[in-house]
Amino acid sequence: MELNTVTLGDFVKLADVLWEKGFQSIDQSMRNSGLVKVVNIPANTGNTREFSEIDLQEYAKLKTESDQAERAQVQQGWTKTMTQKRVALDIGISYEMRTMNKYPEVVSKLTGSGRTVGNRMDLDLSHRITFAASTSYTNMDGKTVTTTTGESTATALADSTHDLRGSATTYRNILANNPRLSKGALEGMERLIVEETYNQFGEQMQMPFDILFTTNDSNTVNTAREYLQSTADVGGANSGVVNVYASKYRHVVLPRLMLDANGASSSSYRYYWGLASSVYSSLYLGIWEEPRLLNPIELGKESDEDWDFGVRGGYGIVTVSAAWIKISKGDGTE
């Protein structure tokens, strides 16, 4: 069937298929990384959500014979309010495209539109780490995005002095001197985990860190793979040598981590890397409206000329606390 004979109803069905093909083709690397906890928000429940953390003391206490057990202490942690935002684009399938059978242009527009909302969501999520050392940034829409945790001092996600709600103890989660990924730097990051991971009582936590994340800089990616995947032949010159990092972390490559606010590659963020705990992550993505396609009838824009389609999505992002992630900017700064 030629485009110049297709009805609007049939074309809408075709558009849905092409849009879905485009949406399924994208790699939502940040959303699916394990660094993010996705929460679906029911309809008609408001445009904000409050996220919080609660810590139980780390150790049980002595109970002597016939005495009542001591009641566990519970400490309310930090709280952060998420606010929903919507993103959108409209595209038009022109009269000429339909009547002159411009299949490539039509397919390109519809499949391309299927990628836009998911890509923007993933970019916004990635920028929570890209701009982790700042308290805010200006996004591509010219809007100020706050990137602080829920701490009362409005602290950046990556900082040398994080506060605790139930203790005067402070901790850091940004590696001193921000070295590039190397064996020594990785050991330094692991030392940071051992010495600078606390609950809200100021007790050191044994938190499982299972993710090594990097940008898609080839040198950084290859270095990470060498550490995590190299093996030694037991019959070779290095027999008996064990790779202590094998299977210790899951390597996650985040291509949008090195992009600036406008989505352009920036050398300033090229060597970002870090370790994270997927279990204790407090980076939340709230989904009010999954990416979807609106047809001309839903948009109310049907005309004798262009058939207009729209893509929409609604979501919010917050980071409650910082103990679950350790970061290096890789730029050698203090």
Image: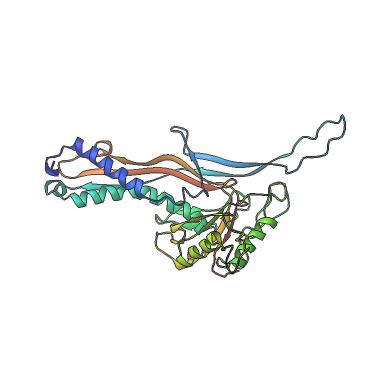
Which residue of the protein is positioned furthest toward the right in this rendering?
A: 65
Q: 150 or 265: which is nearer to us?
A: 265
Q: Position of residue 91 (x, y in %)?
A: 26, 48
**Is residue 189 shown above or below 310?**
below
Q: Is residue 88 visible?
A: no
Using residue 231 as the reference point, say whether residue 96 is left or right of it.
left
Give the residue at x 48% y 63%.
Answer: 221
Using residue 21 as the reference point, say whether residue 105 is left or right of it.
left
Which residue of the protein is positioned furthest toward the top in this rendering?
A: 66
- Can you say which quadrant of the picture contains the C terminus? bottom right
- Can you say which quadrant of the picture contains the N terminus? top left
Give the residue at x 31% y 45%.
Answer: 21
Image color mode? rainbow
Q: 46 or 288: which is nearer to us?
A: 288
**Number of residue marks:** 0
**Is residue 16 shown above or below 208?**
above
Q: Is residue 203 visible?
A: yes
Which residue of the protein is positioned furthest toward the front in this rendering?
A: 235
Q: Position of residue 315 (x, y in %)?
A: 44, 43
Q: Position of residue 138 (x, y in %)?
A: 45, 57
Give the residue at x 18% y 48%.
Answer: 94
**Is residue 142 shown above or below 84?**
below
Q: 65 or 122: which is nearer to us?
A: 65
Q: Position of residue 85 (x, y in %)?
A: 43, 45
Using residue 186 as the reference point, say whether residue 307 is left or right of it.
left
